[in-house]
Image (cartoon, rainbow, N blue to C red):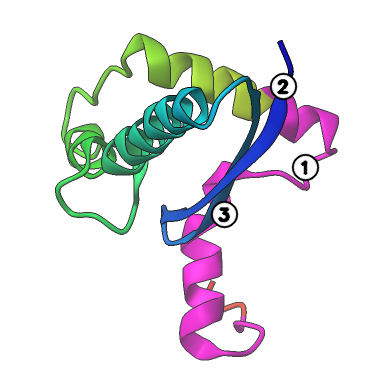
Amino acid sequence: MTLELHRNVFSEMGCPCEISIYADSAKAAREAFALGEEEAGRLDRKYSHYRSDSWLASFQERASQSGGAEADAETAVLLDYAQSLFEFSNGSFDITMRPLTALWDAVRAIPSPEQI
């Protein structure tokens, strides 16, 4: 059996994506690509902060109410991993930076202390 490298380029989550796989046939590669694209789409639908219909948007709304919201198991694992990356990177990787980066994008300059 000879494995060949197959590549699939697609767009998801607002950015270009690529899956590279070694497979013994183009058919097997296409099947793997379909699964990968499906999973990327599922993650986008669940965690996109650009989509008002995402699970994340609903979670944020519930979390802002009294009583808060409980994360599901998949999200809890993701948050634990994000915390590990935050610690490993000495704070360079920070998933809580979205409001600040949105402000930065809006003013197209370094925001003033009052804006922050």
**Range of magenta residues:** 84-112
Name of the residue lying farthest toward the front: 1
Mark 2 Cα within 10 Å, few/some/many (few <14, many 20+)? few
Where is residue 27 drawn, in percent x and y? 45, 27
Residue 115 visible, this angle: no
Q: Nearer the viewer, mark 1 or mark 2?
A: 2
Mark 1 Cα within 10 Å, few/some/many (few <14, many 20+)? few
Residue behind mark 2: 3
Going by the image, does 62 lie left or right of 11? left
Say if mark 2 contacts mark 3, CB within 8 Å.
no
Where is residue 70 drawn, in percent x and y? 28, 17
Whichever of labels 3 and 1 marks the residue nearer the N terminus, that label is 1
Q: Quadrant of the N terminus?
A: top right
Whichever of labels 1 and 2 marks the residue nearer the N terminus, that label is 2
Asked which quadrant contains residue 116, the reply is bottom right
Q: Does the magenta segment cover residue 88?
A: yes
Residue 72 visible, this angle: yes
What is the C-alpha distance between the residues marked 3 and 1?
A: 11 Å
Whichever of labels 2 and 3 marks the residue nearer the N terminus, that label is 2
**Label 2 is placed on what type of residue?**
Leu
Which residue sits at x=22%, y=35%? 55
What is the C-alpha distance between the residues marked 1 and 2?
A: 41 Å
Residue behind mark 1: 91
**Label 3 is placed on what type of residue?**
Met
Which residue sits at x=46%, y=54%? 10
Q: Does the magenta segment cover residue 95?
A: yes
SS at mark 2 in the image: loop
Above/below status of 85 relative to 105: above
Of residue 3 and residue 103, the one placed in the foreground of this image is 3
Going by the image, does 29 lie left or right of 21? left
